[in-house]
Amino acid sequence: MITVDSLTRSYGAHAAVDHVSFTAEPGRVTGFLGPNGAGKSTTMRVIVGLTDPSSGTAEILGRRFADLPNPGREVGVLLDASAQHAGRTGREVLRINARLMGLPASRVDAMLDLVGLTDEEAGRRVRNYSLGMRQRLGIASALLGDPSVLILDEPANGLDPAGIRWMRDLLRGFADDGGTVLLSSHLLNEIEVVADDLVVIGQGRIVAAGTKQSLLASGETLVRAADATALGEALSAAGLTATATDGGLLVTADSARVGQVAFAAGIAVTELRAADGARLEEMFLELTASTSREGAAA
Amino acid sequence: MSTTLSPTVAPASPGVHADGGARRLAKRPGSGATDGTPERIPFGRVLLVELQKMFDTRAGFWLMASIVIASVIATGATVLLGDRDSLSFDSFAAAVGSPMSIVLPVVGVLAVTSEWSQRTALSTFTLLPSRRTVIGAKLVDVLAIGAVSMLLALGIGAFGNLVTSLVTGNDAVWDITASTFAKIVLANELGMLLGFALGLVFRSSPAAVVGYFVVNFVLPGISGALASSQHWWAEHAGWFDLNQTRFLLFDSNLTGEQWAQLGITTLLWIVVPFLVGLRLVMRTEVK
């Protein structure tokens, strides 16, 4: 359980994080979504006590991170997979962390196994690791203390598709076992596959938060029929707004109502379903556009 | 709309989940963790882990090894090149002492700065949020390394002294008292502390090492030049120049006034930077 309450972090006059509040619940994967520079990493650094907040609070399991007696045993953190001593081997990195947490050395081998780093790879110095291997090592380190909360900043960076799949299954399993997962990403697609809840941040502020279903549901229906023109006429006759999209019609009504109208008009539909979360994606694109360098083109 | 990242990636495993986290976190096999709130990390463990971190990289290992290597070379050179008939234990102590006075402060600097240069501070401070504890453990380790290194160096010097007496047939001259040795150790520990404090202030290996050498080798030159033209400075430099009195520790007996000067300059050059650096480390964000 992570509770962030009205968290603000300012640099001079600029608020990188501006009154951010959200909760990450146990048993659920909370996706922390926002374009680069939106304040995701700063928020996460404040949560784990690496950055002091200007105001507001962040608590994990009911306590400030700094008050956790042995944080690694309760919270697994991976903020930057590259932040490891280049001259240590992967195994040495884990051994040191295990020793500090007071864990037996056997735990190191168990975690190497879990993240799929071979003996040979674990014996290599981190400077020779690919980004994907560093992410796996970072995950191993985060899971070492068998925590009940995971905080991961862009963990899918550098992973290949199979690695992303593996990571997703791992996080799903962790949450299904009752763990809390807070996971950030700047890619909507990446996060919507695994997250149960979404917190969307832009320019330091929360712009949307809730369960994935509620955010992705657009309240619109996509309908297709062989005779799109007749269907369009029938829908407008019924007082519904329909806009043409890619061979189909996007209707501001639920699918039951749209189906009735088509049925009454005797039109056979070829597809009828709730439209995708276009609103979330559009909102996210707008956010990205207004903060990214492609803004003018988007 | 496709919700997958790539055609080869299938949707997430069908972990149906509706209980909102009422379930306890199931312990995975091989878990070494126990239930309930874990105990606070004991300071002794932090000391050992920080000590291990100073030795277990290639750079760290060779830095530590260089203490022994430099002592052996200095002792060997003294036996081979010195005027053997007049060599005493004191000559060897001086010979091994000078490389120590360069290597040990670098140990002090790197103990702190490697956390930032290698960016390990990120994981160090998330596993142990009390930065004061981490810095405290490093400080104790650094001072212990200084004392052990000096004992080691002196042992190697003593061996050189014995070898010399075997070569010349003269009796070995043991002309170092415990208090002389203690002063040499103190001088080197002060050097390490200066390095440590500069490490805290700069949190960057190159900046802090250069800073140390400026303080140690450039400032004495400037102070000397100033003293030769400025009568007042020549008289009073001892109250401001750490090196003047610290260097006396290596080979002289200090007067009461000189001890006072050592105290003042230590405060000025070591304690103040240390406190400033500690404050910076406590407050700055770790990225």
Image (cartoon, helix red, strand yellow):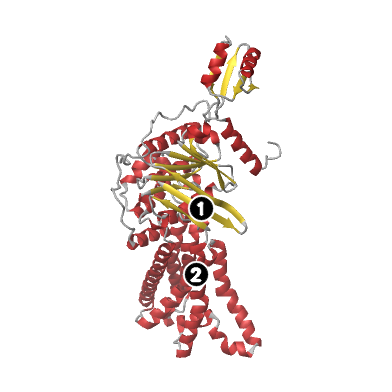
- Residue tagged 2: B197
Q: Position of residue B99 (x, y in %)?
A: 48, 70
- Give the SS element for disc 2: helix
In the visual, does A6 lie left or right of B133?
right
The amino acid on which the numbered mark 1 sits, given as a three-letter code, is Leu
Q: Quadrant of residue A280?
A: top right
Q: Residue at x 52, y 79 (%)?
A: B242
Q: Nearer the viewer, residue A189 or A197?
A: A197
Mark 2, residues whose alpha carbon is within 10 Å: few (<14), some, or many (≥20)? many
Q: Is residue B284 visible?
A: yes
- Give the SS element for disc 1: strand
Q: Position of residue A96 (x, y in %)?
A: 38, 53
Q: Nearer the viewer, residue B121 or A275?
A: A275
- Residue tagged 1: A7
Distance, label 2 to label 1, CA atoms, is 33 Å
Q: Position of residue B257 (x, y in %)?
A: 48, 89
Q: Which mark is residue A28?
A: none
Q: Chain of mark 1?
A: A
Q: Quadrant of residue B69?
A: bottom left
Q: Position of residue A120 (x, y in %)?
A: 41, 41
